[in-house]
Amino acid sequence: MRCVFVMFDSLNRRALGPYGGKTVPTPNFDRLAKKAVTFDKHYIGSMPCMPARRDLQTGRLSFLHRSWGPLEPFDNSVPEQLAEVGVYSHLITDHAHYFEDGGATYHNRYSSWEFIRGQEGDPWKGVVEPDRQRFSELYHEKQTGSHPRDYFTNNMVNRDQIKNEADFPSVQCFARGLEFLETNRDADNWLLQIETFDPHEPFTAPERLKERFKTGWNGPIRDWPPYARVTESDEEADEMRANYNALLALCDELLGELLDYFDAHDLWKDTALILSTDHGYLLGEHDFWAKNRMHTYQELANIPLFVHHPAHAGSAGQRRAPLTQNIDLAATFIDMFDAKRPMEMQGFSLLDHMDEEKPGRDAVIFGYFGGAVNITDGRYTYHCYPNDLEKQEIYQYTLMPTHIWQMFSTEELAGATLSPPLPFTKNCPILRIPVLKTSPFSPNMGPLCLLESQTTLFDLDNDPAQEKPLQDAKIETRLRSLMARLMAENDAPDEAFKRLELRRSSD
């Protein structure tokens, strides 16, 4: 068995042709849909980037215990599980978060890996005194930095390295992926993960593609939306959306190169191809940009998933509607290669849904650590917040106390206690660290950075855009009961129930 797993970041499901998107032609996503089974109710788990990747590697949700962080010593990892049955795994990525304090344990689980430098704020090239005057003229003031090597400055320095289209990190990722296929086309038992940060912001796309979506904007480069409410002029907002569209068009072209290779060498007959993302992205819907600040709306939570498997080629072009979740990809890889399923894994194999429409989960929960616990049963979405985000009792459970770019502060660690083992920590006691307002993660993705925090119910059938909150105590009670059950199955700590005024389903 062989498998190629393609993972884009911040891929907006509703922008893709197979899901009804019309603004950006996506002929290659359309091509893939004809070869694969398209899943319509596939959902995220933990948000944002690295929490989602922890879910994907371990096959269980992490957001009820932990914010952004590395794989833990007790975590299962799909690449390691595959290695036990002789499967070689190779990661190609330009996602710099793998190589920061809060992600540095993921890539080493693969048999081999390649890191393409230069995306977003990757601290890559050593330029001590960048030409800030030129940068201030070239880039919008809201995406230029002032410190020696802040995130915006890093990005501007990185973009100076892109001289030709072949220099774009995502282009390099797919080129290396084709190189792997050419080298290993006759080998068996491998998993190739081609993962690119695009179309994550900043929306850096080739000029020829930007020309296709020109808005008439005459200002400086504006392709990096804030994580905030939309306050920009219509012209500025249109320009940022146009740059996302141009970058999505690049992603479609890169996918097309991979599909061309599958066609040329008839890999469809013996190689699986799976494509998905970590989460979606808001481009002004609900009057918000990006993520992390608002309800986990459908644009963020309901993500694309395409699955081709040679043994299920007869289902090509079909669609499936069971509720599935990103943790199910881990179980699918385990099933695909006949590896041993860890007892801690919560996902279910997607292969069971390939040949016919079957019932799936009755509900899924998802969210950010410390924010709402969200649930959908496929008909309704319910976003359940604590009454007071500032006063809630909440702890991080970890043996790897790092945030995205730094260690936990000594102030945080001063309040740590050693908790007895949790059901999934394999008899390891674990640090229980109180969340402080001064935590380094709070300004970026913690509960105190939320701009929406009102518990809300939506009816997706009658209000698919989630614009009209629904008041229905009976439905809310049912969803709260489902939520409590799923949280208990995830071994959520006691305070996770207390903060939402829920009872454990076994109580």
Image: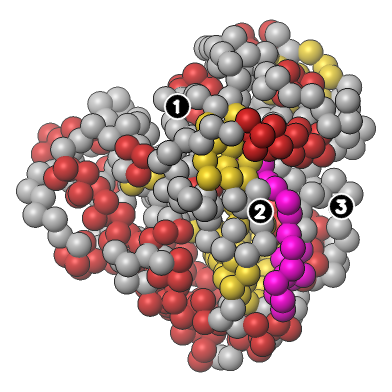
Q: Nearer the viewer, residue 323 or 141?
A: 323
Instruction: Return the mark for residue 325.
Output: 2
Measuring from the top left, give residue 452's x and y in whole percent.
45, 26
Question: Which residue is drawn at the image coordinates 32% and 32% (left, top)?
Answer: 229
Location of residue 372 (image quadrant): top right
Residue 293 position by quadrant: top left
Instruction: For mark 1, give the secondary structure.
Output: loop
Amino acid under label 2?
Answer: Gln
Residue position marked by numbered label 1 in the rendering: 452
Q: Residue at x 65, y 82 (%)?
A: 315
Relative vertical location of residue 433 with respect to residue 348 in this rendering, above or below = above
Q: Is residue 116 above or below residue 124?
A: below
Inter-mark Cα distance, 2 to 3: 18 Å
Q: Is 199 or 490 nearer to us in this picture? A: 490
Q: Amino acid at mark 3?
A: Pro
Give left or right: position of 231 versus 356.
left
**Residue 363 sits inside the magenta stretch:** yes
Residue bearing the label numbered 3: 342
**Amino acid type at image mark 1:** Glu
Labels 3 and 1: the sequence-earlier one: 3
Observer-side mark, 2 or 3, equals 2
- Which region shows up in magenta? 349-369
Tell whether label 3 touches label 2 (CB within 8 Å): no
Farthest residue, direction right: 427
Q: CA distance from mark 3 to mark 1?
A: 37 Å
Q: Position of residue 85 (x, y in %)?
A: 85, 67
Percent coordinates x, y for residue 170 in the rendering = 41, 61
Indicate which label's residue lies in the foreground, 3 or 1: 1
Left or right placement of residue 267 versus residue 330 in this view = left
